[in-house]
Image (cartoon, rainbow, N blue to C red):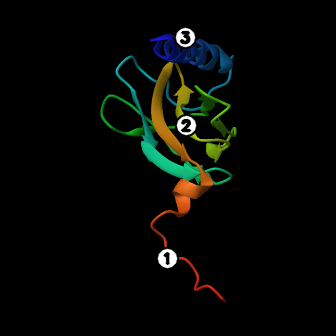
Amino acid sequence: MRSIRSARALLALVLLATAGACGGESLGPAASGSSTVSVVPSLATIGEGQAVQLTAKLFDEFGDPLEAAFAWSSSNPDVATVSVGGTVFGRREGRAAIIAGAHGHAQTAAVVVLRKEQESEGKPRPPSTN
């Protein structure tokens, strides 16, 4: 329950930050209240030390893409961090919500980070030399 409250608080902060981050800049047509954000992939599984690139897009109420600079954040930076460009880096086993926000709209992607041993399970092992 505590992690849900933490994730909600983080999402609220991201929304506030992205709403104010645009200052007087014009990045194209303004997003309306019915605009949506899409993050692809919406679910990613990576190993410790691996990375995955996420992409976010903002769409208006008609489904047309809008220009937007996204702010990225992680609900659990001990597990996964995210760069300003949306690259997620797996740090240790666990789960994190990666949040992309722009113009007061946000969407999350779920990231699962596996231990290195779990990541290699099921893959063929090289033959032994004994």
Identify the residue position indicated by label 1 in the image. Answer: 124
Q: Nearer the viewer, mark 3 or mark 2?
A: 2
Q: Determine the CA span between mark 3 and mark 2.
A: 20 Å
69 horizontally vs 65: left or right: right
The answer to whether the residue labelled 2 contacts the one labelled 1, judged by CB atoms less than 8 Å apart, is no
The vertical placement of 114 against 71, above or below, is below
The vertical placement of 69 against 5, above or below, is below
For mark 1, does the 10 Å Cα neighbourhood hold few (<14), some (14 to 19), or many (20 or more) residues? few
- The foreground one among 59 and 129 is 129
Residue 55 position within the rendered picture, expressed as x and y whole percent measured from the top left: 52, 46
Residue shown at the point (65%, 41%) measured from the top left: 92
Task: Pick the quarter of the image with the C terminus.
Answer: bottom right
- The foreground one among 88 and 20 is 88
The part of the image, by quadrant, that contains residue 100 is: top right
Outermost residue on the left side: it is 62
Dot 1 falls on a residue whose secondary structure is loop
Residue 4 position within the rendered picture, expressed as x and y whole percent measured from the top left: 46, 15
| Residue 9, numbered circle | 3
The vertical placement of 90 against 123, above or below, is above
Amino acid type indicated by mark 2:
Gly
The part of the image, by quadrant, that contains residue 15 is: top right
Q: Earlier in the sequence, mark 2 or mark 1?
A: 2
For mark 2, does the 10 Å Cα neighbourhood hold few (<14), some (14 to 19), or many (20 or more) residues? some
| Residue 94, numbered circle | 2
- The foreground one among 92 and 101 is 92
Residue 67 position within the rendered picture, expressed as x and y whole percent measured from the top left: 54, 37
